[in-house]
Amino acid sequence: MATALITGPTTGIGRAFADKLALEGYDLVLVSRDETRLKEVATELTRLHGVACEVLAADLTDADDLARVEARFQAGPIEVLVNNAGFGQKKPFWANPIDVEENQFDLLVRVVLRLTHAAVLPMIERGSGAVINVSSVAGFLQRGSYSAHKSWVTNFTAGLAIELHSRGVAVMALCPGFVRTEFHERMGMDKTIIPSFMWLDATELVDAAWKDLMQGKAISIPSLRYKLIVAATRYIPRALIARVSTVGLDGRRRV
Ligand SMILES: NC(=O)c1ccc[n+]([C@@H]2O[C@H](COP(=O)([O-])OP(=O)(O)OC[C@H]3O[C@@H](n4cnc5c(N)ncnc54)[C@H](OP(=O)(O)O)[C@@H]3O)[C@@H](O)[C@H]2O)c1
């Protein structure tokens, strides 16, 4: 059976990917920090879908832990990588300690860069495989360092998709809008200020992303409303986008 490696699979979008890939028949390598929770999720996925689950407890921002995860790509074939682990911050860049900013940069950018590299080399040799890098609609906006990191993820991934298409390796950036997960609680954001129609369901998001991957898309923006929002960002003046982008964040002007 083919194997998929997912970062951040214990909850939210990563958990939805774990269910989807198990339903598609993949054995799973599950990577995040909380080992107890990882083991619970692994047991449940095996019970629900009958797939084998390997647990790799790692803080991806720790150099030794990241090296262990990179080594897993050499230990046995990984056909699908989902770079999903991430977190947001309520305060703007200048109000956060620089170490926290650097930690977020490491997880959202450096880890994606290194794990993508570790994954695609064997995929290129085999002539098959897929990488999904979970980015964000925020990457099309001006919303602080998070948005800059996600902009990098989308751009990096879309470029790599073009390079690797002819080598049989599919690469896609998934750009969700607001998704109901633990993400906003973890960052301490008041979710009630986001209108209900803006929220996406993680399972539906991942189903749409998987269809887009199968269709060979380099960038997936699930749902019509977010496709329209992203299209609109090309025509709306930057200053207005910047104002709208501050909704829900501390220490900034509100619209
Ligand atoms: N929710 C949204 O509205 C939304 C929108 C656009 C994009 N995204 C992106 O989607 C991705 C997943 O977000 P989510 O909403 O599903 O968040 P979530 O529910 O908070 O889940 C985050 C996952 O990442 C893991 N994780 C966090 N830090 C880690 C670290 N240092 N090392 C290893 N694993 C780590 C967490 O597990 P542990 O705590 O056990 O490590 C957890 O499994 C992120 O990249 C996020 O930026 C989310």
Image (cartoon, grey):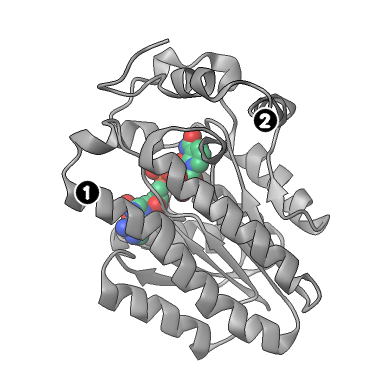
Percent across and percent down for residue 215 are 83, 55
Classify residue 52 as left or right of residue 229: left
Inspect the image, locate mark 1, and give the three-letter code of the amino acid beneath it.
Val
Q: Residue at x 70, y 64 (%)?
A: 161
Residue 53 visible in this rendered orientation of the protein:
no
Q: Nearer the viewer, residue 139 or 59?
A: 139
The label on residue 234 is 2
> On the rendered image, what quadrant is the N terminus found in?
bottom right
Q: Nearer the viewer, residue 37 or 31?
A: 31
Percent across and percent down for residue 23 are 68, 58
Disc nearest the viewer among 1 and 2:
2
Q: Residue lying farthest top?
A: 255
Distance in Å between CA atoms under marks 1 and 2: 31 Å
Disc 2 packing (10 Å; few <14; some 14–19; many ≥20): few
Disc 1 packing (10 Å; few <14; some 14–19; many ≥20): few
Q: Secondary structure at mark 2?
A: loop
Classify residue 62 as left or right of residue 164: left
Q: Residue at x 65, y 69 (%)?
A: 26
Residue with the mark numbered 1: 100
Percent across and percent down for residue 170 are 73, 67
Q: Is residue 126 above or below residue 52?
A: below
User: Does ligand 1 reach within 8 Å of label 1's beta carbon?
Assistant: no
Q: Earlier in the sequence, mark 1 or mark 2?
A: 1
